[in-house]
Image: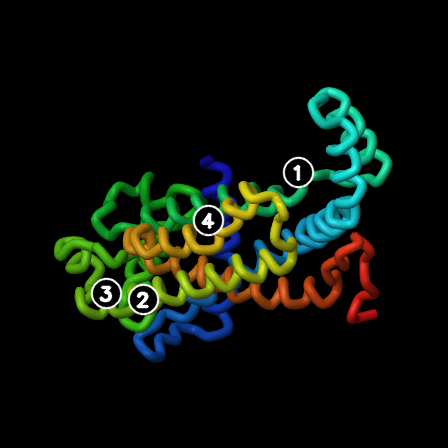
Amino acid sequence: MSLIYTAISAVLLLWHGAWRTTLGDLSALATDWSWVLGIIFLVLTVRALLFPVFVRQVRSQRAMQRLQPQLKALQAKHKGNPQALQKDLTELYRTEQVNPLSGILPMLVQIPIFIGLLHVLRHLKPTITDHASRTLYGWTAAQFDDAAHAKLFGAPIAATFHSGAAQLEALGAHGLTVKIVAAVLIAAMIVTTYLTSRMSMLRSGWSEDPQQRMVQRLMLYGIPASLLISGTVFPIGVVLYWTTQNLFALGQQAWILRRYPLPDATGAQPASITP
């Protein structure tokens, strides 16, 4: 994981440096914009790199949806014979050049990135004085100290909703300010996560299988609900990252739904809305 932490730090520090050069020490609205924009552009960098993967994912999903009549026919033909069914399914996927597992690839790629940013921001503690610890993952001591005190509307990006008095004192922050900023961001994270999940369902279509549909509903409502609790332990910078990612994903999925519309009931792919 150290390699992931170093890579994430490198991208974050790259964008921070670029915005620091452009904006200088701009701190309007009690916000250190070079660090905040560094996190936002970290999102844009990750999403841009993953965009070709998402396009391939959607194409594979559409192919799977077009194959639904054939899949149902094979399931009826080989009812009670899973070995023969799996053999014919594998042949069908090979012939049609479809990978049924491609849909989970973007999620698998993003998980270590999210965990890595969570670790990096949690590491930004002013109480850490050891030089070796402050310069982990390619940081300089000056960058570490600057980021540890960076704020968004007066709330340190390294603080959480539940940050204790001692930590807030070390960060030079006011507890009420941190709770208000964190609460607003957590609410935005929950709402945008729900909207992103809902649009993802529109993109992939609701499953006809009752169990799979139950899983889809759990993802649609369960994940946003879980963030009400887990979001309070995330650093504000991580919540900002998640919310920004959701906003970008909403725009991306809106484009995908127009560019790759859902097949009709017969499995035929309608013409794309855009050329």
Query: Which class describes the residues within 10 Å of circle 3: few (<14), some (14-19), or many (20+)?
Result: some
Asked whether residue 38 appears in the rendered view, the answer is: no
Q: Which of pointers 4 and 2 lies earlier in the amino acid sequence?
A: 2
Query: Which class describes the residues within 10 Å of circle 4: few (<14), some (14-19), or many (20+)?
Result: few
Residue that label 2 marks: 151
Side of 229 where 97 appears, left or right: right
Disc 3 from disc 2: Cα separation:
13 Å
* Above-or-below relation of 127 to 47: above
Find the residue positioned furthest to the left: 165
Disc 3 from disc 4: Cα separation:
28 Å
Secondary structure under badge 2? strand
Residue 205 position in % (x across, y down): 64, 55
Residue that label 4 marks: 218
Q: Amino acid at mark 3?
A: Lys
Residue at 36% in and 51% down: 226
Closer to us: 153 or 193? 193
Q: Which of pointers 3 and 1 lies earlier in the amino acid sequence?
A: 1
Q: Quadrant of residue 224?
A: bottom left
Q: Amino acid at mark 4?
A: Leu
Residue 119 position in % (x across, y down): 38, 45
Label 2–label 1 contact, CB within 8 A: no
Secondary structure under badge 4? helix
Closer to us: 96 or 81? 81
Q: Which of pointers 2 and 1 lies earlier in the amino acid sequence?
A: 1
Label 3–label 1 contact, CB within 8 A: no
Q: Which of pointers 3 and 2 lies earlier in the amino acid sequence?
A: 2
What label sits on residue 101 in the rendered view? 1
* Above-or-below relation of 233 to 187: above
Disc 3 from disc 1: Cα separation:
40 Å
